[in-house]
Image (cartoon, grey):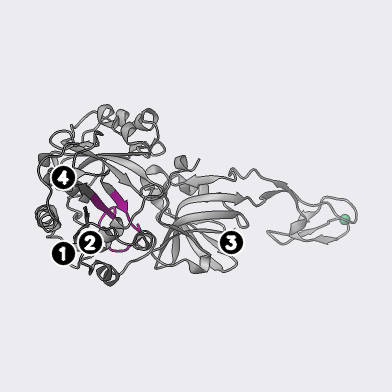
Amino acid sequence: MYIAVDDTDSREGMCTTFLATELIKEFEDLRLLDYPRLVRLNPNVPWKTRGNGAVVLSFRRGRSSKKKIGDIDGDLRYLKGKPKMKEDAFKRAKNIIERFSHLQSSKTNPGLIVTEKRTPESLYEKAVKDIVELKDVIDVLEDDVYRYKGYGNKRGLIGASAALAWRPDDFTYEVLAYRREDMWGKSRELDEEDIRSLDRRIDGSFDSYDHEENKQAIAPNSPCPVLYGVRGEYPEELQKALDIVSGEEPDRWVTFLTNQATDDHLQEVSISKAKPWNSISVQGKVCSNPKTIEGGHVLFEIEDETGQITAAAYEPTKGFREVVKKLIVGDRIELCGGVRKDPRTLNIEKMKVLELGEKTVKIRNPECPECGKRMSSMGTDAGYRCKRCRTKADEDQAIREKVDRELSEKWYEVPVSARRHLSKPLKRME
Ligand SMILES: [Zn+2]
């Protein structure tokens, strides 16, 4: 039996993954069959609350596994009591949702689904890459195998059903530690040096610390119940974080299986097919030199045989902008990022330099083709003239020298603190 939930948080607090821990507590009479799943969906949807992540729990009657995957009021691995029916499970889950969701916020529109059957995989594909309409989801859910409820405008049903549709191909894990309720909203006291050491001390972990900006990246700034989350490839390795990070003591923790850091959201398209709110990967040629606009954003144009789009490295991408500024017209690159609607702009998440164009600077005036004397400039971009024999030469006759591009034909990515949950870090691409 699966329980899927989405959109229970608001800017003022809560987190759907925390609500999942309350569901696990409620269903302690059943065996948790698998890691709880945290499924991130299209990061570009205009109405998302915060991280746009939905949660799926799968339970089964029977004995529990031996593996420890969390701690909620005691080790999370036991099973006790008798099996319960779907209808009963639905009522119990509904109580939890109504108790913990931020239903008072108009932007919080929870969805709950209890079922024995996953939803069609195509639903995940569409929801992680594009926009899914509520009516399409309701069409799927209007089947007796699904017991569901949507609150408010019912948008949470889209995320919940899409998360139920995820069949992990590529995946990672995140250990999430939560705060005691009396700490919610207060500042988080965690040892910065311990956090800095995580990527080094935990095999396969990533994005815990932004070494470029010297900023921790595991604890959120929101008033939500999350103390911190540590991401990586191996669940047992990640549990070490609980011993390494000192400071505020977690109240509970759970390991989630996630689609984070997989690039599942990207679609390879030609530029003319770049639709607003989609995340894409495109290849093309830089066709205007990067310029910095007000606010510190860096913009340039890229084109392929089908069209042209403005690409942007926004201010929060910090040092990545310095890389982008080194591009020149003619460079061949691949860009990954989300497409903004108005103005239509590609918000760069990472970039691969495929082929660098040649950059030269003028080092001296040309020699006269008639008499060999060094020619004189007639002004900026106005060409040259020989003072001795009056011969003229165009500007492009100047003697030029190749300049080191300070870029290599490889991938570049935005710093950890500007990275999307779904973006695959370069560390995972090697
Ligand atoms: Zn001459």
Q: Which residue is mark 2?
A: 156
Q: CA distance from mark 1 to mark 4?
A: 26 Å
Q: CA distance from mark 1 to mark 3?
A: 48 Å
Sequence-first disc among 2 and 1: 1
Q: Are marks 1 and 3 in contact (CB under 8 Å)?
A: no
Q: Secondary structure at mark 3?
A: loop
Q: Count neighbours of disc 1 (C-alpha within 10 A) and say few if under 14, some if 14 to 19, many if 20 or more.
A: some
Please tell me whether mark 1 or mark 3 is closer to you in this view.
1
Sequence-first disc among 4 and 3: 4
Q: Secondary structure at mark 1?
A: loop
Residue type, mark 2 in image: Gly
Q: CA distance from mark 2 to mark 4?
A: 25 Å
Residue type, mark 1 in image: Tyr
Rendered residue at 15%/39% (across/down):
79
Task: Locate residue 428: give its quadrant.
Answer: top left
Boundaries of the magenta span: 38-57
Q: CA distance from mark 2 to mark 1?
A: 8 Å
Q: Are marks 2 and 4 in contact (CB under 8 Å)?
A: no
Give the dominant element type of the magenta stretch: helix, strand or loop: loop
Q: Which residue is mark 4?
A: 30
**Lateral position of residue 275 relative to residue 39, left or right:** right
Q: Are marks 2 and 1 in contact (CB under 8 Å)?
A: yes
Residue 366 is situated, as x and y percent measured from the top left of the image, at 80, 52
Q: Which residue is mark 1?
A: 151
**Lateral position of residue 99 relative to residue 137, left or right:** left
Q: Within the magenta stretch, is there residue 225? A: no
Rendered residue at 47%/55% (across/down):
336
Q: Which residue is mark 3?
A: 287
Sequence-first disc among 2 and 4: 4
